[in-house]
């Protein structure tokens, strides 16, 4: 029997197997990560090799440098993931990999590594969408969490409200019509002279903000669950440039704080409104901006006031990591989706 026939057979057997060990790989941007996850919920290991210090020098991720560093690091990351999980390669039931969305070259490293492993071990290969992975971060953070729920997706690539009807059934309720919220945080950080990645630095600085600044921009989209952040982003950039041209001092703390308040208000208001309108009693946060302390605090408050239970990934699972990919891959397997042959390739854009 050839590879794919065996993989199909094993995939079907695994769907009914009691304990399933998935080795998952994530390389969509600047983290090289490999994890071992049992039954979609128990993280046996999750190694994340971050390239932040390298890309910091350039003020953002340089795709070619990211790909090269994934190649350099991925074998060591695998060894560490296996060692920390205290398993042998032969114990793994399936390999899962992020095939998109992300940087083409970076994704290709993970995809090709995963294909090689799956072929060498003669086990199924599961192709996972990165955004679904971010939702999966909540299954390893909250063992009691089950769909249905509404998801507020806030990452560097996506900003959306998603109706998660079942583990693998997603319906887009609204999304950004321009920039993602993560992009917006990073751009505002850059104009304030803060280093990459900007989000955590804005978060830190905003804690010292005291005065509200009046940015010159139209209020965001109303009567829709879509978001628009480019108007606010441009207003902040113009505010800073104007002040610089006039030689006036800028209170970076106030800029960060006002910006963060406006963005988190918009996200929380729309997410809670959508929950009420659709009759959902659970809101689940996904994506890197989910690490934002003000967003977490505000959403928790809004949720309590409206009797909506709020779930957020633990901080280490908010930003990119392979454990979240292994978590959702288990549910792909149970639903009978995602099995790939060795022609699998990377896709820079993948929707919800
Ligand atoms: O989900 P993620 O790790 O990557 C994508 O899939 O895009 O998200 C990365 C984004 C970056 O824009 C980063 O600045 C932002 O998440 N981020 C934050 C915080 N931590 C990370 N934004 C605001 N506050 C934070 N604490
Ligand atoms: Zn991500």
Image: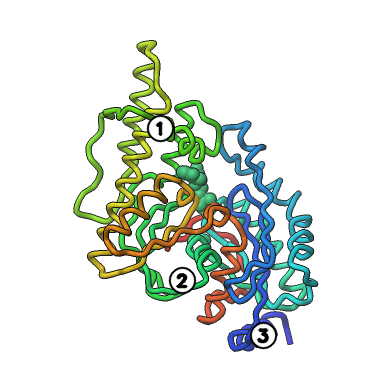
The label shown at residue 256 is 1
Residue 301 placement (x, y as % from top left):
33, 53
Does label 1 or label 2 sit earlier along the sequence?
2
Q: Look at the image and tell me in which quarter the N terminus lies.
A: bottom right
Identify the secondary structure beneath mark 2.
loop
Q: Position of residue 211 (x, y in %)?
A: 32, 27
Is disc 2 in contact with disc 3, using a CB cutoff of under 8 Å? no
Q: Is residue 84 left or right of residue 214?
A: right
Task: Determine if residue 156 is in view.
Answer: no
Q: In the image shown, does 257 or 16 lie closer to the viewer? A: 257
* Residue at 31%, 46% in the rendered image: 265
Q: Nearer the viewer, residue 19 or 206?
A: 206
The residue carrying pointer 1 sits among few (fewer than 14), some (14 to 19) or many (20 or more) residues within 10 Å by Cα, namely many
Kindly report the distance in space between the C-alpha atoms of the residues bearing marks 1 and 2: 33 Å
Q: CA separation, marks 2 and 3?
A: 28 Å
How many marks the image carries: the answer is 3
On residue 145, the disc is: 2
Give the secondary structure at mark 3: helix
Q: Secondary structure at mark 1?
A: helix
- Identified at 65% across, 82% down, the residue is 19
Location of mark 3 (residue): 10
Quarter holding the C terminus is: bottom left
Q: Quadrant of residue 183?
A: top left
């Amino acid at each position: 029997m050839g590879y794919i026939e065996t993989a199909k057979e094993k995939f079907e057997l695994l769907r009914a197997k009691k304990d399933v060990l998935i080795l998952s790989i994530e390389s969509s941007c600047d983290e090289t990560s490999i994890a071992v996850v049992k039954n979609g919920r128990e993280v046996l290991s999750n190694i994340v090799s971050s390239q932040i210090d390298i890309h910091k020098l350039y003020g953002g991720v340089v795709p070619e440098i990211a790909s090269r560093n994934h190649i350099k690091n991925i074998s060591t990351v695998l060894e560490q993931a296996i060692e920390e999980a205290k398993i042998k390669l032969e114990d793994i039931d399936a390999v899962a990999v992020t095939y998109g969305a992300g940087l083409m070259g970076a994704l290709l490293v993970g995809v090709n590594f995963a294909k090689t492993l799956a072929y060498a071990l003669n086990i199924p290969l599961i192709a996972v969408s990165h955004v679904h992975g971010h939702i999966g971060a909540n299954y390893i953070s909250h063992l009691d969490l089950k769909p249905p729920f509404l998801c507020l997706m806030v990452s560097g690539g996506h900003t959306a409200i998603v109706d998660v009807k079942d583990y693998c059934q997603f319906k887009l309720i609204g999304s950004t019509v321009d920039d993602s919220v993560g992009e917006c945080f990073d751009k505002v950080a850059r104009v304030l002279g803060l280093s990459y990645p900007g989000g955590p630095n804005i978060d830190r600085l905003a804690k010292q903000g005291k005065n509200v600044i009046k940015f010159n921009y139209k209020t965001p989209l109303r009567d829709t669950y879509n978001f628009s952040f480019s108007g606010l982003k441009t207003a902040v950039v113009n505010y800073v440039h104007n002040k610089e041209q006039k030689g006036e001092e800028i209170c970076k703390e106030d800029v960060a704080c006002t910006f963060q308040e406006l963005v988190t208000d918009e996200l929380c208001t729309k997410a809670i409104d959508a929950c009420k309108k659709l009759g959902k009693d659970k809101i689940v946060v996904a994506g890197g901006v989910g690490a934002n302390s003000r967003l977490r605090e505000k959403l928790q408050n809004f949720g309590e006031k409206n009797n909506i239970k709020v779930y957020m990934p633990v901080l280490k699972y908010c930003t990119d990591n392979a454990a979240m990919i292994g978590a959702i891959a288990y549910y792909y397997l149970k639903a009978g989706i995602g099995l790939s042959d060795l022609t699998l390739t990377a896709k820079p854009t993948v929707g919800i």
